Amino acid sequence: MPETHFTIYTIFGKKRSVKFPKYNYRSEEQFFHFEFISEGPRGSVRKIVEYTLTSTENVYNLGFGDFNEVNQTIDDVTITNKKHF
Protein backbone atom coordinates (compact mmCIF):
# COMPACT_ATOMS: atom_id res chain seq x y z
CA MET A 1 0.00 0.00 0.00
CA PRO A 2 1.21 3.52 -0.72
CA GLU A 3 2.13 5.83 2.12
CA THR A 4 -0.25 8.65 2.91
CA HIS A 5 0.77 12.26 3.15
CA PHE A 6 -1.03 15.53 3.60
CA THR A 7 -0.90 18.37 1.13
CA ILE A 8 -1.83 21.87 2.23
CA TYR A 9 -3.00 24.29 -0.40
CA THR A 10 -4.90 27.56 -0.54
CA ILE A 11 -8.12 28.01 -2.48
CA PHE A 12 -10.11 31.22 -2.39
CA GLY A 13 -7.93 32.43 0.48
CA LYS A 14 -8.68 29.44 2.73
CA LYS A 15 -6.11 26.80 3.66
CA ARG A 16 -7.13 23.22 2.97
CA SER A 17 -5.50 19.96 3.95
CA VAL A 18 -6.03 16.93 1.73
CA LYS A 19 -4.92 13.38 2.32
CA PHE A 20 -3.34 11.80 -0.80
CA PRO A 21 -1.62 8.46 -1.33
CA LYS A 22 2.11 8.74 -1.98
CA TYR A 23 3.77 6.30 -4.36
CA ASN A 24 7.40 5.40 -4.83
CA TYR A 25 8.32 6.10 -8.44
CA ARG A 26 11.23 6.00 -10.83
CA SER A 27 12.15 8.38 -13.61
CA GLU A 28 14.74 8.88 -16.26
CA GLU A 29 17.30 11.67 -15.88
CA GLN A 30 15.28 14.45 -17.58
CA PHE A 31 12.06 13.72 -15.63
CA PHE A 32 9.85 13.31 -18.71
CA HIS A 33 8.90 9.69 -17.95
CA PHE A 34 7.72 8.35 -14.57
CA GLU A 35 6.63 4.86 -13.53
CA PHE A 36 4.94 3.60 -10.38
CA ILE A 37 2.91 0.61 -9.23
CA SER A 38 -0.69 1.20 -8.16
CA GLU A 39 -1.84 -1.36 -5.60
CA GLY A 40 -5.52 -2.35 -5.65
CA PRO A 41 -7.66 -4.97 -3.94
CA ARG A 42 -7.21 -7.37 -6.88
CA GLY A 43 -3.57 -6.77 -7.68
CA SER A 44 -0.98 -4.32 -8.94
CA VAL A 45 -0.98 -2.17 -12.07
CA ARG A 46 2.09 -0.53 -13.57
CA LYS A 47 1.26 3.14 -14.26
CA ILE A 48 3.11 5.55 -16.55
CA VAL A 49 3.19 9.35 -16.55
CA GLU A 50 4.92 10.89 -19.54
CA TYR A 51 5.50 14.47 -20.66
CA THR A 52 6.15 15.14 -24.35
CA LEU A 53 7.00 18.37 -26.10
CA THR A 54 4.43 19.87 -28.47
CA SER A 55 5.05 22.11 -31.46
CA THR A 56 4.15 25.13 -29.27
CA GLU A 57 7.06 26.55 -27.31
CA ASN A 58 6.98 25.71 -23.57
CA VAL A 59 3.81 23.61 -23.95
CA TYR A 60 3.90 19.92 -23.04
CA ASN A 61 1.42 17.08 -23.36
CA LEU A 62 0.82 14.96 -20.25
CA GLY A 63 0.14 11.29 -20.89
CA PHE A 64 -1.05 8.97 -18.13
CA GLY A 65 -2.20 5.38 -18.16
CA ASP A 66 -1.57 1.71 -17.54
CA PHE A 67 1.50 0.13 -19.10
CA ASN A 68 0.53 -2.47 -21.72
CA GLU A 69 3.13 -5.23 -21.39
CA VAL A 70 2.18 -6.84 -24.73
CA ASN A 71 2.46 -3.70 -26.89
CA GLN A 72 4.98 -1.85 -24.68
CA THR A 73 2.72 1.23 -24.82
CA ILE A 74 0.72 3.45 -22.46
CA ASP A 75 -2.96 2.47 -22.37
CA ASP A 76 -4.90 5.65 -21.59
CA VAL A 77 -8.30 4.09 -22.34
CA THR A 78 -8.51 1.33 -19.72
CA ILE A 79 -10.04 2.38 -16.39
CA THR A 80 -8.70 0.44 -13.42
CA ASN A 81 -9.83 2.76 -10.59
CA LYS A 82 -7.99 0.66 -8.02
CA LYS A 83 -10.31 -2.30 -8.79
CA HIS A 84 -7.54 -3.86 -10.84
CA PHE A 85 -8.64 -6.69 -13.07
Image (cartoon, rainbow, N blue to C red):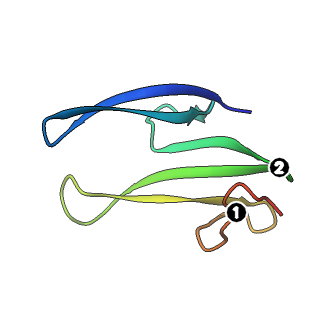
In the picture, the quarter occupied by the N terminus is: top right
N-term mark: 2 or 1: 2
**Which of 30 and 15 lies nearest the eye of the viewer?**
15
Q: What is the secondary structure assignment of the residue under circle 2?
A: loop
Q: How many marks?
A: 2
Name the front one of labels 2 and 1. Answer: 2
* Place of residue 48 in the rendered image (x, y in percent of width and height, measured from the top left): 60, 51
Residue in the image at 20% along x and 52% along y = 58
Relative to 64, residue 7 above or below = above
Q: What is the secondary structure assignment of the residue under circle 1?
A: loop
Residue farthest along the left direction in this orientation: 13
Instruction: Identify the image quadrant of residue 38.
Output: top right
Number of the label disc, if any, that sits on residue 80: 1
Relative to 78, residue 25 above or below = above
Residue in the image at 30% along x and 63% along y = 54
Residue in the image at 67% along x and 71% along y = 78
Relative to 13, residue 80 above or below = below
Number of the label disc, if any, that sits on residue 41: 2
**Which of 4 and 14 lies nearest the eye of the viewer?**
14
Instruction: Identify the image quadrant of residue 36.
Output: top right
Left or right relative to 62: residue 71? right
Q: Are marks 2 and 1 in contact (CB under 8 Å)?
A: no
Relative to 49, residue 73 above or below = below
Amino acid type assigned to the residue bearing label 1 in the image: Thr
* Place of residue 82 in the rendered image (x, y in percent of width and height, measured from the top left): 71, 54
Q: CA distance from mark 2 to mark 1?
A: 11 Å
